[in-house]
Image: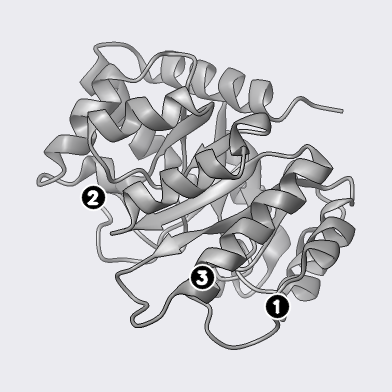
Amino acid sequence: MFIDSHCHLDRIDLNPYHNDFSSFMKDAENSQIDHMLCIAIDLESYPAMVDLVKGYPNISLSVGVHPNVHEGKEPSIDELIELGSEQKVIAIGETGLDYFRSEGDLDWQHQRFKNHIRAAKVLNKPLIIHTREAGHDSLDILADEGADHVGGIIHCFTEDWDYAKKALDLGFYISFSGIVTFKNAQAIKEVAQKVPADRFLIETDSPYLAPVPFRGKPNYPLYVRYVAEHLAELRGTSVEEIAKLSTDNFNNLFPPP
């Protein structure tokens, strides 16, 4: 029923599942989570992430290095292309710009972002975009680098409707996380009401950003239902319709093999 379009399965707290990933997966299946896109944030932990989810056809992967990662291996275009060529990898990222946590000369961050876009274009795979306090620079780089040729997702959307329209014009989908359930997220709620039915996705970004009523606690893909329920309320429709639309949109962006 639901697709979580952005989660970090290698970072969720498995203590409630006796540290047994298969037990978590059974709970996800019982909670009608049909598919999850597990997102990479660095190359050092990537092999373990791949190993964790192997054997689960209902989990897809991205590969990339998050803009907030300051240490570790800097990904080359060729390395991203090599890792991204695997069948289970359906997206490149998460990548983008973050001016909230990074300061000073950020040319390295811009170049990393461009490298991800260039690799995605070679692979013809969509991008997973992280942007924080760098919205317009992110859009400018996406446009300048021709990212509209592959499109992708503005994940955990936190901007306003004017920004959303520009992202949509570049061929990107808007993905809503638990933040849309927060009382003070009025601009995001407006976007959730206005975004075309064929251009939105839902996500958890688990283990981060748990939705109401779990705000401040560890997040899980199971909680994507609460994002869907809130979108249904905002858009005046049913949670089943939100689930269907977001699933159809995910499959349009990432056609099943």
Which residue position is annotated with label 1? 45
Q: With 22 as the anchor, is 130 left or right in this view?
A: left
Front-most of residues 107 and 153: 107
Q: Secondary structure at mark 1?
A: loop
Which residue is painted at 69% across and 64% down in the image? 21
Q: Amino acid at mark 2?
A: Pro
Q: Relative to 148, say whether 24 is above or below.
A: below
Residue 207 percent coordinates (x, y): 46, 64
Residue 2, position as x, y percentages in the image: 54, 31
- Going 50% across and 49% down the picture, which residue do you hit? 141
In the rendered image, which quarter contains the N terminus?
Answer: top right
| CB contact under 8 Å: marks 1 and 3 | no
Mark 2 lies on residue = 213
What residue is shown with label 3?
Answer: 109
Pointer 1 or 2: first along the chain: 1
In front: label 3 or label 2? 3
